Amino acid sequence: MRQLETHPTHLAAFDRLCGASHGPVGVAVSGGSDSLALLHLAQDWARVRQRDLLAFTFDHRLRAASPGEAAEVARISRALGVEHRTLVWDDPVSRQSAARRARHAALAQALIAAGGATLLTGHTADDQAETFLMRARQGSTWYGLAGMQPVSLSPVWPEGAGVRIARPLLAHRRTDLRDMLADLGVIWVDDPTNDNRAYERVRVRQRLAVTPGLYDAIARSQSDLAALRAIEDMRLGRWLRDHVEVSGGRGLAVTLAPLGRESAARGIGLLIQFVTGRETPPRRDNLQSLTDRLLSQRAFPGATLGGAMVTRKGAIVHLAREEGLDRPDSLLNARLGAMRSLFLGQP
């Protein structure tokens, strides 16, 4: 990792995640070590494969130093021959969830406007371990403990329709990436919030740093769980293909019978996100309770959960947005098609 060597495994990782995507490949670059390392590695791949890169920096406008940091990322990008654009949050709010949504929406819209469909982010193996511990504390199932996916759909909807998020660095440690940047003479920015213990991720990161062997134990567990999740995702993909359809302006029509109890709850959570456009599914216990009612033979008068209205007629479950009009069928079909392709492992 200390040298930007063009070797088969390095190229194969980027080829697998974004080689088949159309248009320029986007790179989200904040100026931190992870995203700057991603920018250099992506540029190396793009040069060999003769692909266009487009780097984006989202200025949250929550810190006085952020405009200068964005300008420095622009300078580094130009030096690498990569086009760079700074995106600015017009109405900044000091809340992590709002900032995350605004960032993903702006990045997706800018990438779509440029004709691209794949956005690279700099999540690392360290982020995976942190996610494991945070999800374990929250009572996640084995599926969530498998960590972040190498490829996922944009978490914002409908702004991110058609955009995939790819994470080429999930197998790399942050220390290795920083060693590489140091050898290249690249200086990165350390966001002061990374030391603020008010955030759970910071506390978890510090715990990992002082607990020998914990990272390796988590990595082994996640590797096994990721293999199981790949099997489950194929099952969900076939279910999405064969038993879920857009229901003529009424949201979705779904048959749950082919899935077991746990998988059905996972599928319902996925589809509630689908129809509401929310970034995360409802709480697991609420999802399981709703799913058990839907799978039972007892009368089901209807329910609402996570902003979705859920009804059942015979064996068919209908899901629609609780408030406002449903999305146009064309948009829903496009989103459903993207989900099917993702879970079935198709480009």
Image: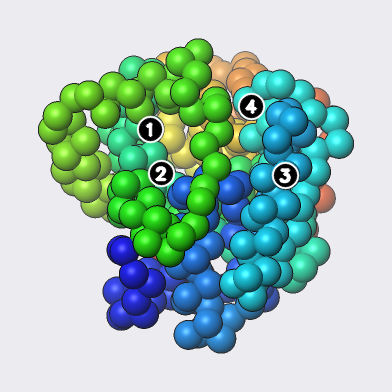
Q: Amino acid at mark 1?
A: Thr
Residue lying at the far front in this picture: please name it: 185
Foreground residue among 227 and 308: 227
Q: Which residue is mark 4?
A: 97
Residue 188 at x, y percent in the picture: 52, 48
* Residue 25, above or below 196: below
Say few, some or many: other residues with alpha carbon within 10 Å of mark 1 (under 14 / 14 to 19 / 20 or more).
many
Q: Are marks 1 and 2 in contact (CB under 8 Å)?
A: yes
Question: Looking at the image, which residue is at 13% across and 33% down?
Answer: 213
Q: Amino acid at mark 4?
A: Ser
Say few, some or many: other residues with alpha carbon within 10 Å of mark 3 (under 14 / 14 to 19 / 20 or more).
few
In the rendered view, does 343 fall on the left or right side of 302?
A: left
Q: Which residue is mark 3?
A: 68
Q: CA distance from mark 4 to mark 3?
A: 24 Å
Say few, some or many: other residues with alpha carbon within 10 Å of mark 2 (under 14 / 14 to 19 / 20 or more).
many
Looking at the rendered image, the quarter that the N terminus falls into is bottom left
Q: Amino acid at mark 3?
A: Gly
